[in-house]
Image: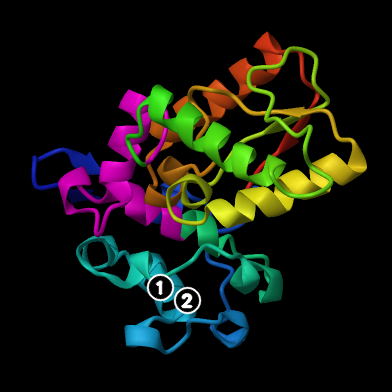
Amino acid sequence: MMETSAGNKMIAVKEIAPLRPVGSSPDMCMGCGTCSAGCPLTGMDGFDPRKIVRMVLLGREEELIQSHLPWICTMCGKCEHACPMGVNIVNMIRTIRGMVERDKVPGMIHKGVELCLSTGNNLGLPAEDFVFIIEDVAGEMAEEPGFEDFKVPMDKKGANLLHTLHNKLVNTQNEDLVHWWKIFHAAKEDFTIPSENWEGVNWGLFSGDDPAMKVVVGRIVEHMDRLEIKNLMYPE
């Protein structure tokens, strides 16, 4: 058993995140390297999923917590798909990330989580600015032949589909919004977009922040219940 810098006891990663999705022994890794062969990032800046699994099994959590290696992983799950023993590698890496002190989380991930909790999106975009962007892009689309009657329904009760958004679609890739909307228009899809708490990318999931992850998921569930919508389109 190790201790954190604050003096609290730290439980071993293999106890928090069993390497098997079922109740069998976590020490099932054979070291065969199939996970490494399936991983698109093996060898990048020293990353190797097999190495991380072995370090966990040897109780070397502290090295991993201090390391950049867990943050290289994209959590795509190809390693788990390839593993003949069903080792739960993604959950293990996410657990390690959750053990990192939040002010030491690299890049913008944790700041994005904090912005999402306080504003409803990873960009920290005010609701009125979001609505303006959506209406502006929709207005430009309505100027194209065949889409003259197009409008984006927001907070529409009883729509068939709730469309949550990737923040990039609002921030830098507005044209990708138009692609989706043209498909919806052609298919006569009855969709709606929430005007608040619209973020569809859960950085709490990627950073190992369980409480934040649950808040973001809970907001989407609340939209579904409040607007009486049964189907969800999730950007990730």
Secondary structure, mark 1, is: helix
Dividing the picture into quarters, in which one does residue 54 lie? bottom left
What residue sits 60% from the left and 73% below the top?
79
Q: Residue furthest right?
A: 187
Against 128, residue 207 (above or below) is: below
Against 201, residue 39 (above or below) is: below
Number of residues whose C-alpha sits closer than 10 Å to that of mark 1, classed few (under 14), some (14–19) or many (20 or more): some
Cα distance between the residues tagged 2 and 1: 5 Å
The image shows residue 140 at horizontal and vertical percentages of 61, 44
Is residue 145 in sight in this rendering?
yes
Q: What segment carries the magenta color?
A: 93-122
Magenta stretch: dominant SS? helix
Q: Nearer the viewer, residue 9 or 90?
A: 90
Q: Which residue is mark 2?
A: 49
Q: Which residue is mark 1?
A: 52
Left or right of 153, for residue 61:
left
What residue sits 67% from the left and 65% below the top?
86
Q: Amino acid at mark 2?
A: Pro
Dividing the picture into quarters, in which one does residue 116 lie? top left
Q: Amino acid at mark 1?
A: Ile
Against 100, residue 69 (above or below) is: below
Tag 2 and tag 1, C-beta contact below 8 Å: yes
Against 236, residue 35 (above or below) is: below
